[in-house]
Image: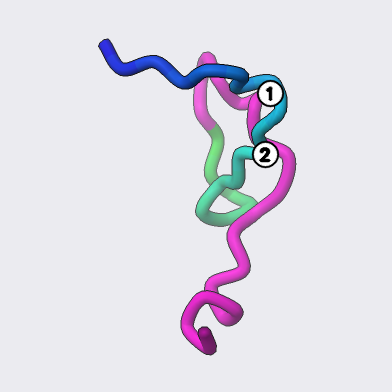
Amino acid sequence: MPRIRNWKNLNFYRPDSETVYKNIDSLFSETIDWNKIETH
């Protein structure tokens, strides 16, 4: 199983605002800005 060190310092983003994850939903703070990714 992969591990992420210091994960408390990371920001997790959900793919869109309608996406809901059963057990880990509280980890996500914002949604991905797909337009920004496409631009850059």
Residue 11's label in the rendered image is 2
Neighbour tally class for label 1: few under 14, some 14-19, many 20 plus, Cα within 10 Å? few
Identify the image quadrant of the N terminus.
top left
Q: Nearer the viewer, residue 23 or 13?
A: 13
Residue lying at 68% horizontally and 23% vertically, measured from the top left: 26
Q: Residue furthest front?
A: 5
Q: Secondary structure at mark 1?
A: helix
Mark with earlier residue (2, 1):
2
Q: Which residues are magenta?
A: 21-40
- Look at mark 1 in the image and give the residue it sits on: 26
Residue 13 located within the stretch drawn in magenta: no
When asked about the image quadrant of residue 29, the answer is top right
Q: Residue furthest top?
A: 1
Residue 38 located within the stretch drawn in magenta: yes
Relative vertical location of residue 35 with respect to residue 33 in this rendering, above or below:
below
Q: Amino acid at mark 1?
A: Ser
When asked about the image quadrant of residue 8, the answer is top right
